[in-house]
Image (cartoon, rainbow, N blue to C red):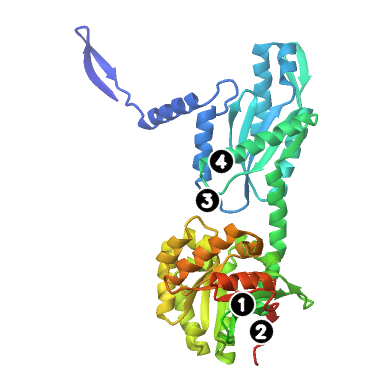
Amino acid sequence: MLALGEHEGEPCVQLIIASRKGESHKLVEDLADAVRRDPATGLLYRMPLLMAVKERLATPLGGGVRYFAVVKPDKFETVERDVGLFASEDVLSAFTALLREGLHPNEIIGRLGGTSVLMLLERGNDHDIEAWGAQLVGRVARQVVRVGEKTLTITCSVGLSVAPTSVLQADTDAAIADALDACSKAHSRGGNQVGMSDKADNDTRVKAYDQVWVKHIKAALMENRFRLVQQPIASLHGGDHAMFDVLLRMLDTNGKEVLPGEFMPAAERNDLLKNIDRWVVGASLSFAAQRKPGCLFVRLSHETLKDASFLGWIDNQVRATRADAHRLCFQAHEDVVATQLERVEKLSLELRSRGFKFAIERFGSSRDPQRLLESAAIDYVKIDGALVQGLTSNQELQQRVRTLVEQAKARNIETIAERVEDANTMAVLWQLGVQYIQGYLVHAPEEIVLRG
């Protein structure tokens, strides 16, 4: 803009140029970014790097996998000796430029310390990560670096570890430590190679294992290839109360029985426990409506205990099957009850108000079992089989079980001993006041057959 003005008492024309706020803002950003980066390599310094990693891990990954990679040039002290300390920074700059070439926009790179570079990678799958590492090692080895009159080549070691899904600092620290350890192992094997952390190897195997089992579990649910088996619970004070512990089996496509220990870990890791629980509860209600047992003990997983829709679902199931609610006792593992006590307390009250019963299984191994008795609405406790197994020859265990029985009786809670396998153990349990037992001494699990 032009305007009339005066300079040193003489008339003049002023040329006024307005400042550009956008450019000023960008300049501030550029300055702030420059402070965060190493001028020699352009990589983030350690603290800005770790903060950027933390922020990125807090952002959900839409798909694919995240890995940490620690990359370090092999025998860099030899380079420093050959070209000098100052010139070695030029070599390091050329090396890090290679590292940055293959990165995706959302991936992070920075100097972890010394010549070690940390990267947070986001790729489609584990094979993509492994391919990236192999390609990087080959690319670095082929690169010829010129420093003054000298030319040289270097190699590098790469360590990979799976990035955590949580933002807990301890998890992030552990994963980076795994990548550092994998890089050190690759270096100790001669360098010029990729090392995978043991945990990453294990995670890869688990993912492959889960992919197979998830397909089997979903197919079994769709094709109704799950089966219930029952194990009788016997009274130590006479009479047949027709009480049974309900266990689960899966049939493979050839009709062969598959035990829960084979498929339940994969179900838990892949959010399928609620689906399985609902199949078991539905089948148990149908059996209770048809055969009218005294009581069926049915397990609920920690996922179902957190499921707000479970009560509404079970109300519909009771109406559909016309089962008597008092014929089912839902049971939860003591460890789960202890960690979800408030939720379990509310659920047990709701279930009992509908006529169902509630039990804690594997009871007696927590730090404060009496607190659980006082907090939740409970009808039975199943004394942990680990306590029962060595009972006959261990006075300390006997006193511990006696105390548990007395605490339960004081609150009108009945006691059941798990995994009873011999008559001597049964006799001791009777002396201690335990009311019921289950285990192979009573009967092995047998399949429940529903009428068509």
Q: Which residue is mark 4?
A: 172
Instruction: Verify CB contact (< 8 Å) between mark 2 and mark 4.
Output: no
Residue 246: assigned label: 1
Q: Is residue 377 left or right of residue 52?
A: left
Q: Nearer the viewer, mark 2 or mark 3?
A: 2
Which tag, 1 or 4, sits closer to the chain's start? 4
The correct choice, above or below, for 366 with respect to 132 in the image is: below
Q: Specify the amino acid type for callout 3.
A: Pro
Between label 2 and label 4, give the one nearer the viewer. Answer: 2
Q: Quadrant of the N terminus?
A: top left
What secondary structure is found at the residue carrying circle 2?
Answer: loop
Q: Earlier in the sequence, mark 3 or mark 1?
A: 3
Question: Within the image, what quadrant is residue 443 found in?
Answer: bottom right
Front residue of 294 and 92:
294
Q: Tell me the mark number nearer the camera, choosing from 1 and 4.
A: 1
At numbered mark 1, what does the secondary structure look like: helix, strand or loop? strand
- Label 1 amino acid? Val
Residue receiving disc 3: 60
| Amino acid, disc 2 | Ile
| Label 2 Cα neighbours within 10 Å, binned few <14 / some 14-19 / many ≥20 | some
What's the CA distance linking mark 2 and mark 3? 44 Å
Assess disc 1: are there few (<14), some (14-19) or many (≥20) residues with their C-alpha within 10 Å of its C-alpha. Answer: many
How packed mark 4 is, by other alpha carbons closer than 10 Å (few <14, some 14-19, many 20 or more), is many
How much space separates mark 1 and mark 4, taking CA atoms?
A: 41 Å
Residue matched to label 2: 448
Taking 275 as reference, is 14 above or below it? above
What is the quadrant of residue 76 in the picture?
top right
Given contact means CB atoms under 8 Å apart, are the residues at marks 1 and 2 in contact?
A: yes
